[in-house]
Amino acid sequence: MIYQYFFEVSIVWLIFLIIYKFLLGYETFFQKNRVYLISAVMIGLLLPLVRLLPFSFQTDILPVTGLYILEDGLSITGLNNVVSDNPGINWSVIILMFYLAGVLLGVSRLIYGLNKIYKLRSEALVVSKNGYTLVVTNTFHLPFSFFKMVFVNRDMLEHKAIKEILKHEMTHVKHAHSFDVFFLELVTIFFWWNPLIYLYKHAIKETHEFLADQLACDTGSKAGYSRLLLSQDESSVQLALTHQFFQSHLKNRIKMLDKSNSSNFRLFKYLIVIPVALLMIIIFSASSDFHDHHSIPEELIVKLDKSMDQNLFDNGINPTGETNVVQLYSSLKNEFPKYSSYIETQIVRKAKEYGYDLGFDHHENGKYCISQSSTEISFPERIHPIVKADSIPDKGRAELFK
């Protein structure tokens, strides 16, 4: 189940990322691109869960006989295979441990970054400003913002372009860009193995810089602002979880500064998100029934395999039998309600192997009847009576229809 969820999240992220790269990434609607990217990540996390909603666009999907996918990702052919008592290397456990190690590393990295920022602030001069807090540090680092705080090295205050730098960082503060970064860091902890999340992080940070650059040089010279970007050393180490004025997107940032604003007519391209999202909702909802029929619990398969022998079908639906079809079906249906149609299909299939035809007749209010006849001869006396299967007592006896 979790593997399928990860796969479906990746599919959604990939589709929306392709749309962004080829249709939206070159537009100057930076704020809308920011909303699009964050929404794409959130939609990717939520859309695969649509199968949990109480509706479906697809019904009456029959399971494929012969191949069934177990919950642990293994597959078996047919239902008569013997489950090995010595499965060998448990790859599921190994993969899980490897995944959890990556999660633990991500959590450690997040805590380390937050602690580093906390130490910088605790050793710095903190000055409250209108709408933000200026943190003047003695440690050398590039100017950066973190939520409502702007961190600047004391020597940087003497920089000739300090006003433009602070205006740039205040844009990050005003638009709450740190929330985007922090959200993506949390998602990365659980999807550290997925390269798509790193592409989204790069795209959203780049979009943040485009927006901040655009607002920072509205009242100044674009050429002078571009020279300011080019004059800085890009080799400095960046702090995690922060926005820094001098980041590694210089080429694209300067390119976007020189680009004319996109025409409002191009906003229609964002509407493509609506049909794409609806289509994926339909696909995931339709696949929920298919998944339910194919992710058969191994316990159910084993119980069916052990219970369906010659004696079961010889006893048939005879209420005096110690074990019979009615008792088996009722017991498994109550224990595995999601897989009632699968149980029914397998009982019918197995009965045919022993020369019997079974029929399930479902009625209103969840009631059902089971009829049985032999396929070997067609004499009426070989036909067992129909049993009222929904009235089975606890001991497994059945009441015959009169």
Image (tube, grey):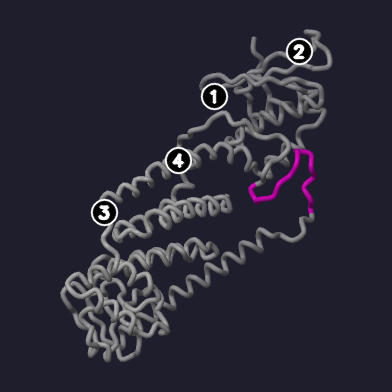
Spatial CA span between label 2 and label 4: 49 Å
Within the image, what quadrant is residue 323 found in? Answer: top right
Helix, strand or loop at disc 1?
helix
Image location (x, y in percent) of residue 123: 31, 88
| Residue 317 visible in the current orientation | yes
Tell whether label 3 touches label 2 (CB within 8 Å). Answer: no
Disc 1 marks a residue whose amino acid type is Gly
State which region is magenta. 71-85
Q: Nearer the viewer, mark 1 or mark 3?
A: 3
Image location (x, y in percent) of residue 357: 75, 20
Spatial CA span between label 4 and label 3: 28 Å
**Is 338 situated above or below 170?**
above
Tag 3 or tag 4, which sits nearer the N-term?
3
Mark 2 surroundings within 10 Å by alpha-carbon count, few (fewer than 14), some (14 through 19), many (20 or more): some
Image location (x, y in percent) of residue 168: 25, 74
Disc 3 marks a residue whose amino acid type is Ser
Spatial CA span between label 1 and label 4: 33 Å
Q: Which residue is mark 4?
A: 279
Image location (x, y in percent) of residue 62: 63, 31
Mark 3 surroundings within 10 Å by alpha-carbon count, few (fewer than 14), some (14 through 19), many (20 or more): few
Spatial CA span between label 2 and label 3: 78 Å
Disc ID at residue 263: 3
Mark 1 surroundings within 10 Å by alpha-carbon count, few (fewer than 14), some (14 through 19), many (20 or more): few
Helix, strand or loop at disc 3?
loop
Q: Nearer the viewer, mark 1 or mark 4?
A: 4
